[in-house]
Image: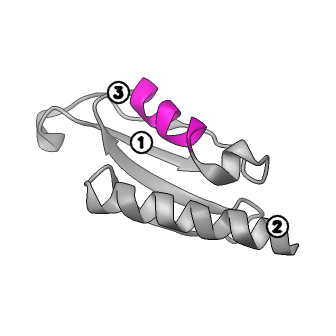
């Protein structure tokens, strides 16, 4: 990883921590399959998760390429949508 990429990844970590603290990300970590990582988000819609990824510094810098896969809203999630995606 270049020094520039390391700096962007630091911004990515700060961004995802802020989302974790707000309850938008419930689980995340490094991936072993070539993706940067995997994020499980608890959001109101697929579109909200897509916006979260669009604003991620790593995605903006072209380091990560997100895929978003979401469940349907269920009472179990208290009206929220659960999304999983590698970044």
Return the x and y of residue 80 as percentages of the image width and height. Answer: 22, 35
Q: Residue at x 18, y 42 (%)?
A: 77
Q: Is residue 87 visible?
A: no
Sooner in the amino-acid sequence: mark 2 or mark 1: 2
Answer few, some or many: residues within 10 Å of disc 2's Cα (few below 14, many 20 plus, some between 14 and 19). Answer: few
Sooner in the amino-acid sequence: mark 1 or mark 3: 3
Tell me the quadrant of the picture where the N terminus can be found.
bottom right
Q: Is residue 10 above or below residue 51?
A: below
Where residue 22 sits, quadrant-wise, is bottom left
Answer few, some or many: residues within 10 Å of disc 3's Cα (few below 14, many 20 plus, some between 14 and 19). Answer: some
Q: Secondary structure at mark 2?
A: helix
Tell me if residue 1 is in the magenta stretch: no
Q: Residue at x 51, y 32 (%)?
A: 50
| Residue nearest the viewer, comparing 84 with 4 | 4
Residue named by callout 1? 83
Q: Is residue 86 visible?
A: yes
CA gap, disc 1 and disc 3: 9 Å
CA gap, disc 3 and disc 2: 33 Å
Return the x and y of residue 68 as percentages of the image width and height. Answer: 55, 37
Answer few, some or many: residues within 10 Å of disc 1's Cα (few below 14, many 20 plus, some between 14 and 19). Answer: many
| Residue range highlighted in magenta | 46-55
Residue named by callout 2? 4
Q: Is residue 38 above or below residue 53?
A: below
Residue named by callout 3? 45
The structure's colour scheme is one colour
Quick one: which residue is furthest to the right in this view? 2
């Amino acid at each position: 990883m270049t020094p520039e990429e390391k700096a962007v990844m630091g911004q990515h970590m700060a961004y995802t921590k802020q989302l974790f603290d707000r309850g938008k990300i419930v689980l995340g970590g490094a991936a072993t399959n070539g993706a940067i990582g995997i994020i499980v988000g608890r959001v109101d819609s697929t579109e909200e998760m897509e916006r979260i990824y669009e604003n991620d510094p790593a995605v903006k810098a072209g380091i990560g390429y997100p895929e978003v896969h979401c469940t349907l809203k269920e009472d179990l999630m208290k009206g929220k949508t659960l999304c999983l995606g590698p970044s």
